[in-house]
Image (tube, helix red, strand yellow):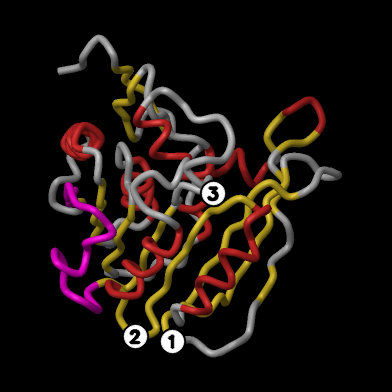
Amino acid sequence: MISSNETLDALFDGRLTLLQSRSGYRFSLDALLLAYFVTVKAGERVIDLGTGNGVLALVLAHLHPTAALTGIELQSAMAARAGRNVELNGLQSRIKILHADVRQISDRMSSASFDAVVCNPPYRKPSSGRTSPNAERRAARHETYGELEDFLRAAAHLLRPKGRMALCYPAVRLIDLIAAMHQLRIEPKRLRLVHSFLHSGASLVLVEGVKGGRVGLAVAPPLIIYREGNLYRDEVAAMIAGLPK
């Protein structure tokens, strides 16, 4: 049942469908960028910290047919909508949604129980920038219910040794991200900067780290979103179409 404050949207030419709030949080391209960046091997267990409406878990299930996914979401209404999206796409056997707080994850879930963690965490301090009056949007953008370090600590608890964590984060806070990952022994191993246009500065960064990994960072070629005329470049267009990695 779709409420009056929800829309039903199609992804990948209708191969996935997604309930979203009309006025609250709505997924952005960031989720696709992260889904296509993270390393997921056959049969692995993957957890999404702050899953929102579940879009990242749904996309990963589409891209990796043997992976088992879990999504953690603090906001009860968002967690409920994520659960409905899982059912809507018939993925109950592969995706589990938990209503939980990443800051208390060690009380809810066993340590070293996942192969990979994905996270698109809030990135603004509570007092910085314009704060949305909508609770869902505010929680997605501002560190209202957890700071970067809280998500990293949760990942460090959940990851098996040599497990991987991948994040999408604003490029302006890259130093904060690298320093925090290094401090919690999730050693950054892969990095890719994201630019809207060829000659614009980076707006986002994709980083993947390994729990207990050795020092050594591989920097991939930049990912450019648009070509002239504000058309998506081929790599991004393939993501939007849901093509295999």
Location of the N terminus (image quadrant)? top left
Position of residue 120 measured from the top left corner of the image (x, y, whole percent): 45, 51
Instruction: Please tell me which residue lies in front, 127 or 47.
Output: 127
The label on residue 161 is: 2
Give the secondary structure at mark 1: loop
Which of pointers 3 and 2 lies earlier in the amino acid sequence?
Answer: 3
- Seen at 53% across and 45% down, the residue is 124
The residue tagged 1 is 212
Inspect the image, locate mark 2, and give the three-letter code of the amino acid beneath it: Pro
- Seen at 69% across and 70% down, the residue is 219
Given the current orientation, which residue lies at the most extreme front position?
127
The stretch in magenta equals: 96-113
Mark 1 and mark 2 in contact (Cβ < 8 Å)? yes
The residue tagged 3 is 33
CA–CA distance between discs 3 and 2? 25 Å
In the image, residue 22 sits, relative to residue 142, either above or below, namely above
